[in-house]
Amino acid sequence: MKFGEALTLLNAGHPVTRHGWNGKGMFLIRAGGYIVEADQVKPNGPINAEFLERRGLTHLEILPHIDMWTVNSEGRQAYLPGWLASQSDMLAEDWMEYKEPVEEEGNKPRRITLSSERVQALKLSGFWDDPVKRDQMIRKYADFDRESKKHEEESVPTKKPKKLHWTQTAKGKKIMANRKPRGSKK
């Protein structure tokens, strides 16, 4: 999607990200647009209750703005207030709504691996070049695989117990134990 569409999502309260960003897990949010009472302002910060009082204010107004959750190449995560779009960001068409990774057993993000046939199908359908459509189709493939696996596990016939040779039964073992070895004299 284009930057303008991403702004519309941000204004509606949805986090957005770019497919082309290097740090996986980076996203933007619309923040601000609220008031903090003077006695609730951080006391040791540059804008504190005394600062507001000197100006005759009883509250601090936080104007709407865009903030970023960042992730660098070493995996360091941080909150960056006051993000500004570059020209590349504004002209990009790889914007999408950010979705938190789905966590499964062991709190590991789910990894989806596509077969070369599925990648080829996405390319032929034109979905590969559109990050939003590509992600939607990958999720659909994953859902389909998960449901297929569930049905496969449910429909696996129960194996009949292997029939034992008579010598392996309790009675057979007793008989065999009481027999004399072959070639022995009576």
Image (spheres, rainbow, N blue to C red):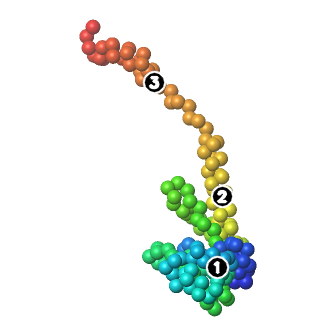
Residue 33, located in which quarter of the rendered image? bottom right
Name which of mark 3 and mark 2 comes first in the sequence. 2
Which residue is depicted at the point 63% across and 91% down? 87
**Residue 46 at x, y = what percent?**
52, 85
**Residue 133 at x, y = what percent?**
70, 72
Q: Which mark is residue 102?
A: none
Q: Is residue 159 left or right of residue 4?
A: left
Which residue is depicted at the point 50% across and 74% down? 77
User: Comparing marks 3 and 2, which lies closer to the viewer?
Assistant: 2
> In front: 151, or 13?
13
91 up-or-down from 142: above or below:
below
118 up-or-down from 32: above or below:
above
Marks 1 and 2, how far apart in space? 49 Å
Q: What kind of element bears circle 1?
A: strand
Name which of mark 1 and mark 2 comes first in the sequence. 1
Marks 3 and 2, how far apart in space? 46 Å
Kindly identify which residue carries mark 1. Answer: 59
Which residue is depicted at the point 51% across and 58% down? 107
Q: Which mark is residue 165?
A: 3
Which residue is depicted at the point 51% across and 77% down? 43
Q: Amino acid at mark 2?
A: Asp
Q: Which mark is residue 143?
A: 2
Q: Amino acid at mark 3?
A: His
